[in-house]
Image (tube, rainbow, N blue to C red):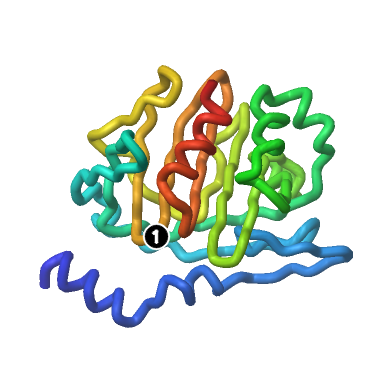
Amino acid sequence: MSNKQIKNIISEKINKEDIRNNIVNKRGIDMKCFKYGVCTCALVFMVGVFIFDSNKVNNIKTESYGNNSFNINKLDDVASHKLDAVSRKVDEKKLVNEFYFYKDLLKSDILKNYNVEGIYIKDSKGEYNKLNNYLISTYKEDKSINIAFSKDSEPLRDYFFDDNGDKYNTINGKNIKIYSYENSYMTVFSYKGVNFAIETSNIEIDEFKKVLELIVK
């Protein structure tokens, strides 16, 4: 039986939304849910990993807005990534001072009604005290924008995909690969000593570009 046949059989029995909703809760006081499915100070989430050869870049598509266009690395599929973390509220004053883009990013109309969290993973003692990255998230109806960033680590992501696309887009002099899967745009890159992982859902390509321009400048 070929890999493709195996993949099709498993895909029929496994619903990706069910995977994302298969979250193990460890509840505490004053919990607040956000995109990853984690809750403030208390939620541990585990998502199964299903990685075949399915997250290969399938082809390149060009998306236009006005007189401009973007080259998009289109993915055949993405895989859910195994995560084990909790979220906690953070002091935004610290972020304003530490990250060059933070203040301008949050002034933008794109990120209205945002939420910001620190994402913590286990330390050497098995306690969730090691800060891995920060996450800014915003939701409006069916639209979402999630910006994970860190100076010291690779940000945790909802989805796993190989960063092996062929086409770049230049944003203010920085070459960045943009990926698409179904109704989502995604990218991972480093800029000025900060690692970024950006995932969106149901937004237009020009909105995605505006988010990048607020960071890469």
Q: Quadrant of residue 52?
A: bottom left
Amino acid tagged 1? Asn
Task: Please tell me how many numbered marks the rendered image carries.
Answer: 1
Please, is residue 210 above or below residue 145 in the view? Answer: above
Q: Classify residue 25 by image quadrant.
A: bottom right
Q: Position of residue 108 (x, y in %)?
A: 65, 38
Q: Residues within 10 Å of mark 1 (few under 14, many from 20)?
A: few
Judge whether 77 appears above or below 88 on screen: below
Q: Secondary structure at mark 1?
A: loop
Q: Which residue is mark 1?
A: 183
Q: Residue at x 41, y 46 (%)?
A: 205
Please identify the residue farthest to the bottom as the structure is shown.
Answer: 13
Q: Residue furthest front?
A: 66
Residue 100 rendering spot, x and y as whole percentages = 67, 22
Residue closer to the observer: 40 or 130: 40
Most foreground residue, 18 or 181 = 181
Q: Is residue 190 left or right of residue 24?
A: left
**Along the line of sight, the residue nearer the viewer: 168 or 156:** 168
Q: Residue at x 36, y 48 (%)?
A: 161
In the rendered image, residue 56, in percent from the top left (x then y), is placed at 25, 50
Please state which of residues 8 and 108 is positioned toward the viewer in this rendering. 108
Q: Is residue 39 above or below residue 151?
A: below
Residue 129's x, y, as percent? 76, 44
* Quadrant for the C terminus in the image: top right
Q: Residue at x 25, y 57 (%)?
A: 76
Quadrant position of residue 7: bottom left
